[in-house]
Amino acid sequence: MKTLTVAFVTVAALLGVVFIVVILSMRNQVRDAVVSNLESTQRLFAAVETRRQQDVRSRAETLADNPTLKAALDTYQSEVQDDATASRADLLETIDLVLENVAARVDSDAIVLVDLHHIALGAAGPMANRWPRSRPVSLVANRTAAGPSGADSFDGVARMGDNLFRVVTVPLLLGDTLIGGLYVATSLDQDYAQELDQLARTRIAIVSDGLVVATTLSPRAALQFESAVAVTQPVDGVIPLDGESHAFRRLVAVGNTVFYALGSVDESSRQAMRDAMRNLALIGMFGISLAGVGSFWLAQTLSDPIKRLSTSLATMAASHDVSSRLPLTGSSLELDTLTETFNALMASVGEAEAETQAAYTGAIRALATALDARDPYTAGHSDRVSVLAVAICRQLNLPAGEIEVVRLGALLHDIGKIGVPDDVLRKPGALSAAEFDIIKQHPTVGARMLRSVPFLSPHIPIVELHHERPDGGGYPNGLRGDDIPLGARIVHVADAYDAMTSARAYRNARPPAEALQELWRCAGTGFHAEIVAALANALPGVTSEPPQGGASRG
């Protein structure tokens, strides 16, 4: 085994070194490839985005040539000096109608008309309500073209409340005179980021004023990116995001708003890693096979005796039989000495276990005897209930371990009556309601007594719940049906049968047949029917005459 271990450890160490070198080299190569891909993406994106913005600007300039729009704006600016509220409202309504017609011909979130002071006069489109009338529009813009009379077109960004828009602006000219401007606005939201993601085929993050306003990164990665990049806005770099290394590069910047493309180095390297791992696995299998062939014979010689000993130990552990002895291997003096020592140890354990079991059973019987000694009418009741309970268990084909738990639990089922006053416990007549309430406390008292003795814990459910009924009318918890443990159900039936077939100071014992008939009458409500049936099948082999002793209260 040592030879095999040394061989395997050596091969594993060699493979580990190779694995680390390959992983580091591959990660560096993949990172360089991702960075290079982002650079290509930046150039492609810049070209495509420029063309797209030019298309938007071209459509906007076409819209700006609309004579109806120019006429409405010129009329408004000419007549607004009159300060007639009704006339002003009519002119603005005209502007809104013209803008609605204009917006229907272009795919954008908002078409905005502004005057010479960049005051919004009207807006149309799905997000027109974000551009309130009469409010100034502040643009952070890049000048892109010059028109007649020095009128400029802009590709800019505007913040309106909590919304950020990418804006293409074109001047409105009447002849050579500048009369206002037309803004074509696109919201920089998740949909916009998703479009850029599909265009660039990379993750996208849009950063403005130190915040990530839209991104296709996961929420956690977006927060980490915002913390690391949003304020300083570097051109490119590599940072960890959500447990993976990501390369990032600036695509375009408009004022203080920056568009970033990101690529996961780890995600890109997974396929290459899988290929490398497969190749390393093949190399490792070959190396391990070679090492195994070289050391197999020696290892087999050393390991066979130990294997036989281990098998014997496993068999002993599975059977829980500490009395059996392990056979000597005869192949090694050391192993035979160890086996003999172990056999001696197990013999001592077996003796100690037998003594413990005897003390355990004796303690339980002593408790039951202590209860019986308080009242001559209860003498032998616990033993009889235990015998009946075991007979029921055997009819139900319960395992031996469960039968033993029920047997000893039945012996202890009334142990709580030690705490019941003698004048109640030994009262010759029927109990009053108050006295019966005292008797009903004995399951709880008994369970509390047993909880202080760890080795009696398996029997506590029987002691505490042996007066519960299927219909919930029992005590102390009012449990129903199968919520009552099986052992408690069995002892409940055995206890009731012995109580009915035992004489008391105030009544004679019932015949077994009559007692059984009473159990059947209450089956399903007071007793579990399958337990009553098991008792009926067991009775011919358990008792033929009712006992002469007394039965328990309750």
Image: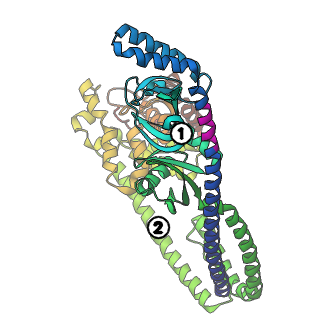
Q: Which mark identifies residue 190? A: 1
- Which of 82 and 36 lies nearest the eye of the viewer? 82
- Which of 522 and 468 lies nearest the eye of the viewer? 468
The answer, for residue 203, to whether it is visible in the render is: yes
Mark 2 element type: helix
Residue 58 falls inside the magenta stretch: yes
Residue 92 falls inside the magenta stretch: no
The answer, for residue 201, to whether it is visible in the render is: no
- Which of 7 and 420 lies nearest the eye of the viewer? 7
Give the residue drawn at x 48%, y 76%. 348
Task: Tell which residue pokes out farthest to the bottom in this image.
Answer: 333
Type of amino acid under label 1: Gln
For the N terminus, the image quarter is bottom right
Image-based side of 195 in relation to 450, left or right: right
Report x, y in % for residue 311. Answer: 66, 73
Report x, y in % for residue 301. Answer: 72, 87
Mark 1 element type: helix
Type of amino acid under label 2: Glu
Report x, y in % for residue 150. Answer: 49, 38
| Range drawn in magenta | 51-59
Q: According to the image, label 2 marks what residue? A: 353
Q: Which mark identifies residue 400? A: none
